[in-house]
Image: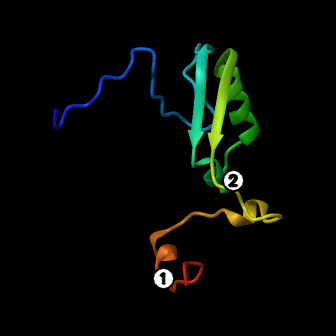
Amino acid sequence: MRGSRPQRPANIVTVVRPFEDPAPSGMHDFDLVTFFYAYHNITYLDVDRAKMNKAFYDALKPGGELVVGDYSAKPARGRTSSKPCMPEDTRKGAPGGPS
């Protein structure tokens, strides 16, 4: 049926929270935590990644899984490969943008 959305299973919860406090208090029984295509963006933000990572694991029940999917940096580039991408940076020919 056009325009209808499939029903979400009752046991799936979408949560959007601050990086360093990713799970609602008292929630320690997640089967799965996913973090896709944004981990590289927090390297230049004032985020305590160790605290965030611990909070991800603390939110999991025993046997739960943390899945982080992201892009990889060029070898030996580390944090220098990641920076905010502003629209002017993405224009062809702009400094730092595609050539």
Quick one: 46 or 63, which is closer to the camera?
A: 63
Percent position of residue 61, x then y = 66, 14
Residue 64: image quadrant is top right
Q: Secondary structure at mark 1?
A: loop
- Horizontal side of residue 64 vs 92, given as left or right: right
Query: Dot 1: within a 10 Å radius of its alpha carbon, few (fewer than 14), some, or many (20 or more) residues?
Result: few
Crowding near the residue tagged with mark 2, few <14, some 14–19, many ≥20 C-alpha atoms within 10 Å: some
Q: Which residue is mark 1?
A: 92
Q: Residue at x 67, y 57 (%)?
A: 44
User: Would you place residue 50 above or below residue 23 in this image?
Assistant: below
Residue at 61% from the left image edge and 30% from the top image edge: 21
In the figure, residue 77 lies in which quadrant? bottom right
Q: Quadrant of the C terminus?
A: bottom right
> Hey, what amino acid is under mark 1?
Lys
- In the image, which is nearer the foreground, mark 1 or mark 2? 1
Task: Residue at 55% x, 78% y: name it.
Answer: 97
Picture layout, residue 36 above or below residue 73: above
Count numbered badges in the picture. Answer: 2
Instruction: Specify the amino acid type for callout 2.
Output: Thr
Label disc, if present, on residue 18 of the rendered structure: none
Residue 22 visible: no
Residue 86, x across and y down, in percent: 50, 68
Q: Nearer the viewer, residue 14 or 51?
A: 14
Q: How is the image coloured?
A: rainbow
The disc, 1 or 2, on the residue closer to the chain's N-terminal end is 2
Specify the label residue 43 is tagged with: 2
Q: Which quarter shows the N terminus? A: top left
Q: Are marks 1 and 2 in contact (CB under 8 Å)?
A: no
Q: Position of residue 42 (x, y in %)?
A: 64, 50
Which image quadrant for residue 58? Answer: top right
Q: Viewer-proximal residue, 9 or 59?
A: 9
